[in-house]
Image: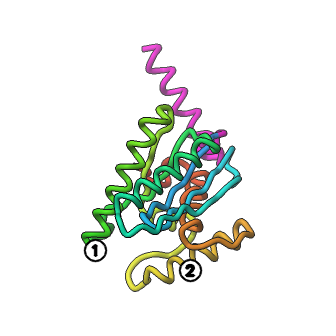
Amino acid sequence: MRYFKSISFFLTFLKFFAIIGLGYRRTKMRIIAIDASTKSTGVAYFNNNKLEAWDCLTASSTDLIRRIAKITKMLKEFLDTHPADKIILEEVRNENGLAQNPQTHRALMWLQAAIAFMVHENFKNTKIEYVYPNQWRSACGIKTGRGIKRESLKDADVRFVSETYGILVNDDVADAIGIGHAYVNQLDNEINWE
């Protein structure tokens, strides 16, 4: 019985901090947000909820496997210099039943798997969480849904980063920063991260 009382107290404690806007996501944490692509991957590093570094990792080979290997190698180098407790990776599954080019979908899934294997092998204490594009954009106040084209979303992402952080970046890096921004500025119950 005493055990249940302590759990109840802990849950009340967490709810109190959530109500006053200090959700446990706001604890000091190092995260890397990734907008993965086999040609141009955006990465953003947040330390103690502050954006500290960002980069665009590019690969131009016509061979898909070589591009994936190059992106994961550069990502490992980024992680070596920017240690993270958690990686937030944009989910690549189809959203809202929308069709995606099967070859592109397969390539992104392979890249996502390669990243997971690389992290598992080299950064055993780093966890990976996944978020859908519409979830993180919503948390950033970017409207998504019917009739909104991908290109206008990319422009909105770049504009969001420019207005919020005062920096000008390409759309891949803007997406990574948006993913990280949504993560560090949202309470756990506001976005379903898994």
Q: Residue at x 68, y 55 (%)?
A: 53
- Tag 2: amino acid: Asp
Tell me: 117 left or right of 97. right
Query: Residue 61 appears at what percent x and percent y?
Result: 42, 67
- Tag 1: amino acid: Asn
Q: Residue at x 50, y 36 (%)?
A: 123
Query: Residue 14 appears at what percent x and percent y?
Result: 57, 36
Kindly identify which numbered label has been placed on residue 67.
none
Given contact means CB atoms under 8 Å apart, are the residues at marks 1 and 2 in contact? no
What is the tally of numbered marks visible in this picture?
A: 2
Kindly identify which numbered label has been placed on residue 101.
1
Quadrant placement of the N terminus: top left
Q: Residue at x 40, y 57 (%)?
A: 68
Viewer-proximal residue among 37 and 65: 65
Q: Element under label 2?
A: helix
156 vs 23: above or below: below
Tell me: 175 left or right of 133. right
Q: Element under label 1?
A: loop
Q: Residue at x 61, y 40 (%)?
A: 83
Q: What separation in Å lies between label 1 and label 2 (alpha carbons)? A: 22 Å
Task: Find the magenta span and give its range.
Answer: 1-28
Q: Residues within 10 Å of mark 1 (few under 14, many from 20)?
A: few
Colouring used for the render:
rainbow
Q: Earlier in the sequence, mark 1 or mark 2?
A: 1
Furthest residue toward right: 166
Residue under pointer 2: 155
Q: Does the magenta segment cover residue 25?
A: yes
